[in-house]
Image (cartoon, rainbow, N blue to C red):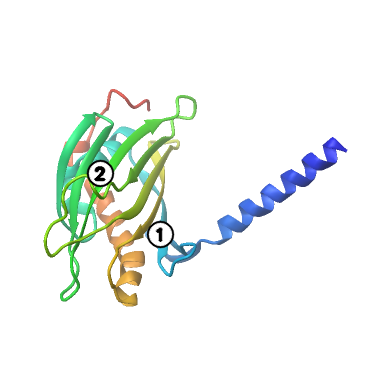
């Protein structure tokens, strides 16, 4: 009887997992970059997910993601990005303003990035929730109060890393559907194309972070 219950429970979990996976719909697939979207529960907004394998080391990717000064070079529509506090080499708070086309009001946010690594698998996870009240709001800019990003970096053979990036965000205020769709498809594609370019820059070559095991 106990064994039967365990089998039924496992089957239920598997079906729930499969259902959750199927919620994501492939929207774009170019240059090895796959962009998925899904509707966030109890909201008309879409979450995005990006999957791509890149020639890099874990240290290179972590260094770029945590290098706030370079965000304007590769993160789509970033008007400014400023480091607010470095808690440790693997944890920080930063401020960023997102440029939106006129007459839509720009958005800004404060994100808390925390990088951790699984000692056994070497998989690196970078969590990036927003902390909306970390600094005072600015005039004529709408503060993003609800957003959560997550990077999962899995090392592969031959100096490759598999990236699984997810983002759920509520930009607040009124934003037309066409712009929401733009940021859900073109935005991630442009960002990850530029990330590949960023990886080739001399500043990140032969780089090794002491807290990352390759």
Q: Is residue 52 left or right of residue 186?
A: right
Q: Secondary structure at mark 1?
A: strand
- The total number of labels drawn is 2
Residue annotated with mark 1 = 48
Secondary structure of residue under mark 2: helix
Q: Residues within 10 Å of mark 1 (few under 14, many from 20)?
A: many
Residue 189 percent across, percent down from the top left: 32, 61
- The residue at which mark 2 appears reads as 199
Which of 32 and 192 lies nearest the eye of the viewer? 192
Closer to the N terminus: mark 2 or mark 1? 1
Residue at the limit of the structure toward the right, as seen here:
1
Work out whether residue 193 can be spotted.
Answer: yes
Residues under labels 2 and 1: Cα distance?
Answer: 22 Å
Image-quadrant location for residue 104: bottom left
What's the mark number on residue 141?
Answer: none
The residue under the point 49% across, 25% down is 120
- Asked whether 207 or 111 is in front, the reply is 111
Q: Quadrant of the C terminus?
A: top left
Q: Quadrant of residue 91?
A: top left
Instruction: Residue at 28% x, 61% y: name it.
Output: 190
Residue 52: give x, y in percent of width and height: 41, 51
């Amino acid at each position: 009887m106990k064994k039967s219950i365990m089998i039924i429970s496992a089957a239920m979990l598997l079906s729930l997992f499969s259902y959750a996976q199927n919620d994501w719909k492939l929207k774009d697939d170019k240059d090895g970059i796959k962009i998925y979207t899904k509707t966030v529960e109890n909201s008309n907004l879409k979450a995005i997910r990006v999957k791509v394998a890149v020639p890099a080391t874990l240290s290179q990717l972590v260094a770029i993601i945590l290098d706030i000064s370079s965000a304007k070079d590769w993160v789509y529509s970033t008007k400014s990005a400023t480091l607010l506090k470095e808690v440790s080499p693997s944890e920080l708070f930063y401020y960023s303003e997102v440029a939106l086309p006129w007459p839509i009001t720009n958005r800004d946010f404060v994100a808390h990035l925390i990088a951790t690594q699984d000692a056994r698998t070497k998989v690196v996870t970078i969590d990036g929730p927003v902390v909306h009240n970390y600094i005072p709001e600015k005039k004529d800019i709408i503060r993003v109060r609800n957003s959560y990003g997550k990077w999962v970096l899995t090392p592969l053979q031959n100096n490759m890393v598999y990236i699984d990036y997810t983002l759920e965000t509520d930009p607040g205020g009124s934003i037309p559907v066409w712009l929401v769709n733009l940021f859900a498809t073109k935005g991630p594609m442009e960002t990850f194309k530029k990330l590949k370019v960023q990886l080739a820059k001399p500043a990140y070559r032969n780089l090794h972070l002491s807290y990352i095991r390759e």
